[in-house]
Image (tube, helix red, strand yellow):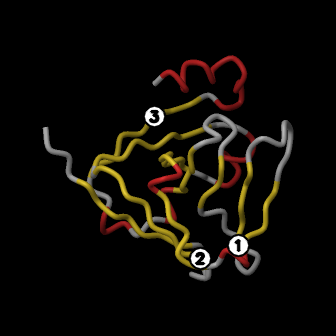
């Protein structure tokens, strides 16, 4: 089966951080209920690092870590938006906030709910998928 490859572009609010992601046209998005995702309405679009390119703004990124210090939450120093980060669950991947992608390339989304409030009990099921 031939896959339909799409290049998605995105940015933070002030557009000082810009990136692209190359993937299939069907996107799977994790809707996590953990403390940071629920308060920021972050929706995870997780892809291998090799499919992600930071186009602009590396010098404007600030990194925040908490709890196990494994995840690297990266924010724009100017507008404060976290458009992507390195997740604790998938440290060799990039999690992009689907809300930061230009919507004209998004045609097909599958939402997967994840009980991040009980991360330790549920992560093994997520990583296997």
Q: Specify the quadrant of the image occupied by residue 16.
A: bottom right
Real-space CA distance between mark 2 and mark 3, rounded to the nearest whole angstrom = 25 Å
The answer to the question of whether label 2 and label 1 lie on touching residues, with beta carbons closer than 8 A, is yes
Q: Which of marks 2 and 3 is nearer the N terminus?
A: 2
- Is residue 62 rendered to the left or right of residue 18? right
Q: Which of marks 2 and 1 is in front?
A: 1
Q: Residues within 10 Å of mark 3 (few under 14, many from 20)?
A: few
Disc 3 designates what residue?
112
43 or 73, nearer to the observer: 73
- Write the residue at 65% across / 44% down: 87
Residue reaching furthest left?
Answer: 1
- Residue 102 vs 99, above or below: the answer is below
* Mark number, residue 13: 2
Query: Mark 2 or mark 1, which has the lower sequence index?
Result: 2
Looking at the rendered structure, which numbered label has been put on residue 76?
Answer: 1
Helix or strand or loop: what does disc 1 sit on? Answer: strand
Q: Distance between the residues labelled 3 and 1?
A: 27 Å
């Amino acid at each position: 089966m031939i896959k339909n490859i799409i290049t998605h572009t995105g940015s933070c609010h002030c557009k000082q951080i810009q990136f692209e992601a190359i993937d299939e046209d069907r996107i799977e998005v994790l809707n996590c209920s953990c403390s940071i995702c629920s308060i920021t309405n972050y929706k995870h679009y997780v892809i291998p690092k090799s499919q992600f390119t930071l186009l602009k703004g590396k010098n404007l990124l600030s990194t925040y870590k908490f709890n196990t210090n494994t995840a690297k939450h990266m924010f724009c120093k100017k507008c404060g938006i976290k458009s992507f980060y390195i997740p604790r669950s998938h440290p060799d991947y990039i999690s992009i906030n689907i809300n930061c992608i230009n919507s004209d390339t998004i045609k097909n989304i599958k939402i997967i709910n994840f009980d991040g409030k009980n991360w330790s009990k549920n992560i093994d099921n997520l990583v296997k998928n």
